[in-house]
Amino acid sequence: MTFEETNRRGKFELTFPVRLVSDVKKSQEWFRNVLKCNDISGWGHATREGMGLILLQAASPEDIRKNAVPKKRSDYPTEWEGPDDGWDSLIYVEWDNLNYVVEEVRSNGGKIAVEPFEYSHGDHTYKKAHISDLDGYNMVLSARRLQTDEPNHQDQENKFKKTFQVRLVSDLKKSMEWYSHVLGCDEVNNWGYARRGEMEVILQQATSPQDVRPNAQSGKIFGIPYTWEGPDEPWDTFVHTPWEDVALIVDEVRGKGGTIGMEPIESSEDGWDFLNAQILDPDGYSIILGGMRRSSDS
């Protein structure tokens, strides 16, 4: 084994925020018809370019709760004091596309919770708008440009660039340190942004401990053909991981003092083998590492 192999870090690949909803099928239809997601699967996926979610059935209406407005304070350890509204996900779009996307969503019957508005911070001007899904989760469209730049007036498209999961935490500074030093993120910056590989989250300071609420155990879906019944443990974020990297990442996080909620467990279904493990952040948010391979490859 070479030096590089012995020091290799596990990969965080394609990542999906997980959202508890009141009715998975109705939510998937909303994402298909209103947000124009082109990949709707029996595993709860709703995806399109630049955005992807896993929708799970909530066991109780009380388990469906959008993020509250984060706390603003003078000692906020980020460059920005925080938004005036609750965010559940942040979606980057091009400046000239934001208003176009809003009107497309509106024409498809979607709810615009906050109409487009602009503000300036530092050297940039920002434009944002909020889309609210069937359960009231806020998807924040965001565009920015340098204040010295003029809009390009490019051809407008209903196109998303990138999406970030937003997470309310009890102690922003401690969470940023955990994501940096324990989860081993490649980048943690003073906007509350944390990234390891393809997993990206925005951490915001909760106003109240009651606002820090990891997903509850999802309900099971039985008797619907080609529909997954759901996981046996709570999910907040699902990270596709190479099969051999699941145990590697678990050992890495454990060695840095992190909490492993579930050791790697194998299962099989429909010709596939699955290997899942669970990492818990300081507030109990569940990061699921998921490896998969054809059963014949084992």
Image (cartoon, helix red, strand yellow):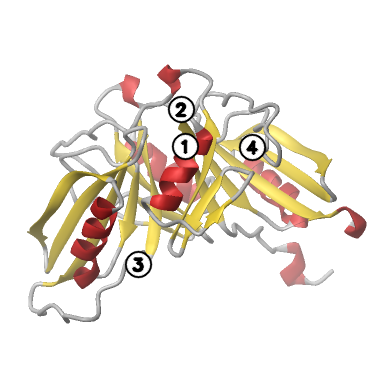
Can residue 75 be spotted in the picture?
yes
Mark 3–mark 1 distance (CA, rounded to whole Å):
23 Å
- At x 89%, y 59%, the residue is 297
Q: Earlier in the sequence, mark 3 or mark 2?
A: 2
Q: Position of residue 57 (x, y in %)?
A: 54, 29
Mark 3–mark 2 distance (CA, rounded to whole Å):
27 Å
Q: Provide the residue designation for mark 1.
A: 26
Q: Amino acid at mark 1?
A: Lys
Q: Earlier in the sequence, mark 3 or mark 1?
A: 1
Q: Are marks 4 and 2 in contact (CB under 8 Å)?
A: no
Q: Provide the residue designation for mark 3.
A: 159
Please identify, in this view, whether the residue under mark 4 or under mark 2 is nearer the observer.
2
Q: Position of residue 140 (x, y in %)?
A: 27, 50
Q: Provide the residue designation for mark 2.
A: 22
Dot 4: what SS? Answer: strand
Q: Are marks 3 and 2 in contact (CB under 8 Å)?
A: no
- At x 37%, y 66%, the residue is 161
Mark 1–mark 4 distance (CA, rounded to whole Å):
28 Å
